[in-house]
Image (cartoon, grey):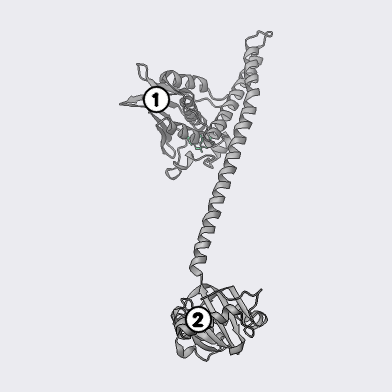
Amino acid sequence: MREGPKSDEPASPAEPRPARERLDEEIREAGITAADIVESIHDPLVVLTSDLRVRVVNPVFYEQFRVSPEETTGRLIYELGNGQWDIPELHTLLEEILPANDAFDGYEVTHEFEDLGWRVMLLNARRLDHLQLILLVITDVTDRKQVEALRAARDAAEEARKAAEEANMVKSQFLATMSHELRTPLTGVIGLTDLLETDVLGPTTGRQKESLARIRRSAWHLVRIIDEIMAYARSETGRTEIRRERIPVTDVVREVVEMLGPVSDDHEVDLRLTVPDEPVLVATDRGKLSQIVVNLVGNALKFSEAPVHVRLSVADDWIQIAVEDAGPGIPAERQEEIFEPFTQLDGSTTREKGGTGLGLAVARRHARLLGGDVDVKSAVGEGSTFSLRLPRTSQ
Ligand code: ADP
């Protein structure tokens, strides 16, 4: 069927335009009947009398709206389907818009039918004044609308994901920059403390030396926290570089143990180290390995009152560094969660001891980048063993 006149360019059936006349004539000449045309329309079509009663509908209408001829013909359109067609927008279209514009296209109506559920329909109407009739064609666009809604929801979700990713990136870049700015002056603090301790700048008393040692320990503690934040920020922005070289793992572990030795003035823990007799050479990233061990041993010392035991062992193509403590232990259901960034168990110890909640997340990310992993075995009240496994050769 040809598209009828639009509301802003009303057709006047009293003065048919030449194109319409020609069409009428061609249809007549071809012997096509109105029934042929009405039946061939795929959208439901309703012919209404001027008092809005149904004169005739096409078969598609019965099918699509599940109504029978008996409850349709001669009825007021609003009464169809037991009043299901008493739709406010239909009143507006037929009683206000159509009398003012003798044709109207694409009037969207969303309505919940008792039998059919929610439907979105486009209504096209024509006033045939010379016949005192109204033609109403109803196109069901519910499926199309659903697809559009799904597409819109998917686009919105994608936008939200991108925005979250960008915000995360900005946060990580901010952390990396800030950490760098904080670390630089600390190097000066540590360097000058070392210098003062050597008495090069003048003699220092025993008590001053004690204070200098405390300053140095606190400064190193701060350096470790900042390094942890930087490592995490770099891993988030995907800027973690791996520098592999053959390194003597025993030396790396020993250095860490010596560095962390007595962890603080008020909290000393016996730290034991067991390593194989022969040197263990591994092709890996020295800085990252060292940071993983610092984080695991640091935690064990922080949370444990009893001895901490660090064991390096070799099996086949793997090395394992196990850090065993006799601290409070970690409940089974939280043993995975503690590897998530910013996760801390809410026991009073954690709050007392401080920390960033990033140490284990960084340790695991580094370990996985190096082809290995970190996991934990723990029982509440008995202690924990965190184990790092790494391949001996480069992947
Ligand atoms: P942080 O130590 O900075 O809080 P981590 O990521 O290193 O962050 O550890 C996360 C949490 O896991 C800690 O806050 C603590 O609650 C728990 N945890 C880690 N190591 C141990 C341990 N050896 N014993 C008991 N709890 C631990």
User: Is 280 above or below relative to 176?
Assistant: above
Q: Could you tell me residue 160's position as x and y percent? A: 56, 50
Q: Nearer the viewer, mark 1 or mark 2?
A: 2
Compare residues 365 and 79 and report the one nearer the observer. 79
- Mark 1 → mark 2, Cα distance in angstroms: 98 Å
Q: Residue at x 39, y 25 (%)?
A: 311
Q: Residue 316: in sight, yes or no?
A: yes
Q: Callout 2, which amino acid? A: Glu
> In the image, which disc is placed on residue 311?
1
CB at disc 1 and ligand 1 closer than 8 Å: no
Q: Residue at x 54, y 27 (%)?
A: 267
Q: Could you tell me residue 33's position as x and y percent? A: 46, 85
Callout 1: few (<14), some (14-19), or many (20+) C-alpha neighbours within 10 Å? some
Which numbered disc, 1 or 2, marks the residue that appears first in the sequence? 2
Q: Residue furthest right?
A: 202
> In the image, which disc is placed on residue 26?
2
